[in-house]
Amino acid sequence: MNDVVQWAALAPLLALVGSLINAFFGRSLKEPVPGILASLAVAGGFVLAVLAFIGLQGSDHGVQVTLWRYLTAGTLHLDAGFMIDRLSVTMMLIITGVGLLIHIYSIGYMHGDDGNSRYFAELNLFVAAMLVLVMADSFPLMFIGWEGVGVCSYLLIGFWYRDRANPDAGRKAFIVNRVGDVGFLLAMFLTFKAFGTLNIGAVNAAAPAMLYGSATLTLIGLLYLLGAAGKSAQLPLQVWLPDAMAGPTPVSALIHAATMVTAGVYLIARIGAVYAMAPAAASTVAWVGALTAFVAAFAAFAQTDIKKILAYSTISQVGYMIAAVGAGAYWVGIFHVLTHAFFKALLFLTAGSVIHAMNGEQDIRKMGGLGRKMKITGVTALIGTLAISGVPFLAGFFSKDAILSGTLTSGLLAGNGGDVVYILLLITAAMTAAYMFRWYYGIFAGASRVDKHAAEHLHESPPVMTWPLGILALGSIVVGYLGLPEFAFPNLIQRWLEPATAKVDFNTVSVSTDWLLVGLSILMVALGLGVGWWVYHVRKGAPVASLKESNLAGASRGALGFDALYRILFVASGEGVAGGIATLDREVVDRGLTGTGAAVGLLGRLATALQSGFTRAYAFAMLLGVVTLVVVAALTGVLK
Amino acid sequence: MIGFVILALVMLLGGVGVVTFRQPVHAALSLVATLLALAVTYVTLQAHFLAAIQVIVYAGAIMVLFLFVIMLLNVQGQEPAPHLRWMRPAAYAGALVVAAGIATIAFIDRRPLPGADQVAALQGGSAEQVGTLLFSHYVLAFQLVGVLLLTGIVGAVSLAQRGNPAAPAEPRGEAAPERELTHG
Amino acid sequence: MVPTPYYIAVSALLMTIGSVGVLTRRSAIMVFLSVELMLNAANLAIVAFARQWSASGVEPALSGQAAVFIILAIAAAEVAVGLGILVAIFRNRVSTDVDELSEVRL
């Protein structure tokens, strides 16, 4: 079955070809050909991923596909090669599967936009880069994919570039990402120094033999965390994701919900062997994740933009994933990636549907009661909301629960505040349910605050957009069953992924404790939903008016002021330096140059005075010459 | 030595007079005084023939010619131009520096005077001595000077001819008003 | 005998006085007079050196005096022609101001 698995290496190539065709010839293709072409490329990738999935059923080793050697420098040999094992195949399925649905949805969403072919070219390029990222068997190749998704993210955020705010948001995303990339690069250098190789498999194999808890391993772990924080929008580099909502909604769904932001999670899971040997770094990872989850959930309460709420929700959920992989529960983190991909993409696509119907309106204060007019969108949005809240029997419940128990029982986190992490995540679960309820209720239920004029245009989206919604909703319900809690039920995904990831010790707890934890999380969900129900339905509070204008509300709306802080720290100081240099350039350099010109002119005018036309002046000049000669002769010749 | 000092004084005072007298006739006469003193100096330098030639040619012919022209043209003394007023002090300064420099060199680089017998060999620079030299060693230069004098005569005569009103002077006369330089 | 440097000093002074006159005087004839003064100063220097080097053996004795003789002749020719030019200029422009004679054409 190896051959079939090897074919999966072609998946990025398919997406790349699709991107190139759309880039060069897309303009001359009539709609919806570019979209169909792009979707076919991704569909091809999906088929290959499925084949590889089937092929890997028997073995728990991966298949190494080496393409070519692209760099030799001393002892450093860099090959372009793919490692197709269970972990990467799982990610490939998510990328191509959810990606395919979003491509199809985009055909409807981007209908009529004159950048249609450009959009699909960039989206395909993104898929290609993301596939390279997850399949790479060496850090530099992964970094190429890493940068590639960053570029595509920038391009797609600023897709409607004519509005200045959009490319600005794209730039912000790219620059913040860059900060994280510095961490990634430094970690690569350190890895090479410590391990002598940049091949991920080799590093993972060599890690258990290294010193447990050594400074080098911890530093490597922390630096990779920095890279992951940038790409996955974790503290303190989370500021770019809310602004990234400036891009088209399907882009937000694919890149900033399902795939790119999970690259950091994938990275940490991939090199789990290193983190398993560095508990300090792993604990830091978990803490970063938990704090981010909490802060982002807090910020989501006061947002009024339909997509910004979902953006903060994404930051928060990715925080959960990061916390999971920090705790050493690698399959759990990937499991949550899977479930989150479904329901977050679903939520974003329903938001897109709403925006489409409301003709571009994104303020939830102007919505309400849309579920009555847009049945399919409303129902699927409800399913998504319940799934993300962690309501039992839907996908989010299983994965979130696994994360909670993982952080509590982790051997890596023990002694480093594992229980505090657990409590943070627990409280955040309640908050998640509450703010997502606010989101759903404020848009689809309750009294209608819709503007009269807009209300007339309200209609359900075309089938090309609603079919993906349905499939994703189904997935949001079903996918969770892959990861049933193993103390009572067969856990398929754990068995599937665990051989591909590192081994970490977890405290075993009694079955009754497990059931207790499950009950506790259900309680939290009920609490959150209940509060939401009471505030918004019973007391009929409007989604924004119900918040008194308190400091708390202000802090929430400003997402705890990270943006403002960064503006003062970096932007203002940078502008100051640039202004100073500009002044320097203008006053010193330019003045110097023009002054030189003026000086030359002055010299010329002085020289003109010599040519006065008066013979006596010339005679005097001759006398001066004689004077000079005499003086020189006197000084040099005679006075010896 | 005393003789030298007296002669030097006369020469220098005469020179200063040439340069400073406002009236041209006074300046010319001052130059005559200088030339005569110079002739006497030549005598002290054992150059009797030259002294005689100096008096006859320079003081006697050239200066007379100058005086003729001065009186003919009725030259008036004038103030120096305002925009060149810096010239006078500058010229004096430059002149002083040059004179001082040359004098310094002369005094530092002095050689011993020739002996009395050598001076006697000069035979006082008599006409015979100089003439012999001119007609033997420097005869070419002598002849060329003759040619030069001929050229000078021709030039002077032709210049004198130009002033003839019957000659084509009208175009220049009519062109003259265009030039802004003509004024009294 | 008076040593040579003294004669040279006097000659230098006369020369420079003459140059001052050249630069300072406004009328062309006065300039000419100053030029004659300078010539004579040079003559004095040459004659003094003729006496100094009379026994050097490089040149015949009294070569300097022969040179001065020739210089005198040249000066005479020069004065004649120069004054002729001045007269011609005066006929055309009535003014012999050197500052105004910036064009050499007649």
Image: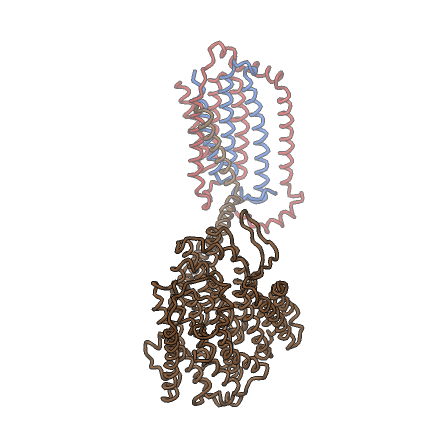
Q: In the picture, residue A579 is in which quadrant?
A: bottom left
Of C64 and A112, which appears nearest the observer? A112
Q: Is residue A434 left or right of residue A202?
A: left
Q: In the picture, residue A413 is in which quadrant?
A: bottom left
Residue A629, percent from left and from top: 49, 31
Check the image and report above or below for A397 versus B147: below
Residue B176, percent from left and from top: 60, 49
Residue A422, percent from left and from top: 37, 70
| Quadrant of the drawing holding the C terminus of chain A | top left
Task: Name, please, the residue furthest toward the top.
Answer: B117
Of B159 and C20, which appears nearest the observer? C20
Residue A347, percent from left and from top: 49, 79
Check the image and report above or below for C7 versus A375: above
Q: Colour of chain B?
A: red
Task: Name, please, the residue furthest toward the left.
Answer: A551
Which residue shows up at 55% across the image and 25% down it? B57
Of B103 and A442, which appears nearest the observer? A442
Q: Is residue A561 visible?
A: no
Q: Is residue A265 left or right of residue A287?
A: right
Q: In the picture, residue B97 is in which quadrant?
A: top left
Chain depicted in brown: A
Say how the picture is coloured.
Answer: by chain
Q: Colour of chain C?
A: blue
Q: Is residue A110 visible?
A: yes
| Quadrant of the drawing holding the N terminus of chain A | bottom right
Number of marks:
0
